[in-house]
Amino acid sequence: MYTYTTKGTCSRQILFDIVDGKLTNVQFVGGCHGNTQGVAALVEGMDAEEVIRRLQKIDCKGRGTSCPDQLARAIRQVLKRQAEATEA
């Protein structure tokens, strides 16, 4: 399971797995419980790249980010690390 510490949102962390390129077990720590549960349910089993494409750059109240955007950033970070590890 991956843990991402968020920046600029009410949620403090996002926990998730990526299995065979699919997002699973998404959990937000903090934030608007109903909204974050909804996001987690909607992306369950979705292709990680598709989640990034759909959620990146969503803004919450002019903050320049949001919980969905932070999830996209977290996934991008993990995929980048995985790619680098494969190249090494």
Image (cartoon, helix red, strand yellow):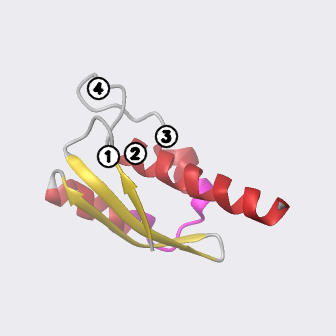
Q: Whole-percent x and y of residue 88?
A: 83, 62
Q: Quadrant of the N terminus?
A: bottom left
Q: Residues within 10 Å of mark 4 (few under 14, many from 20)?
A: few
Q: Is residue 32 above or below residue 3?
A: above
Judge whether residue 46 is colored magenta. Answer: yes
Judge whether residue 21 is colored magenta. Answer: no
Q: Residues within 10 Å of mark 3 (few under 14, many from 20)?
A: some
Tell me the distance, in whole angstroms, between the alpha carbons under discs 3 and 1.
Answer: 10 Å
Q: Amino acid at mark 2?
A: Gln
Q: Which residue is mark 1?
A: 67
The tag on residue 56 is: 3
Asked if residue 62 lies left or right of residue 4, the reply is left
Residues at discs 2 and 1 in contact (Cβ within 8 Å): yes
Asked if residue 59 lies left or right of residue 11, the reply is right
Residue range corresponding to the magenta coloring: 42-50
Q: Which residue is mark 2?
A: 70
Q: Residue at x 28, y 34 (%)?
A: 8
Tell me the distance, in whole angstroms, between the alpha carbons under discs 4 and 3.
Answer: 14 Å
Q: Whole-percent x and y of residue 87?
A: 84, 60
Tell me the distance, in whole angstroms, between the alpha carbons under discs 2 and 4.
Answer: 12 Å
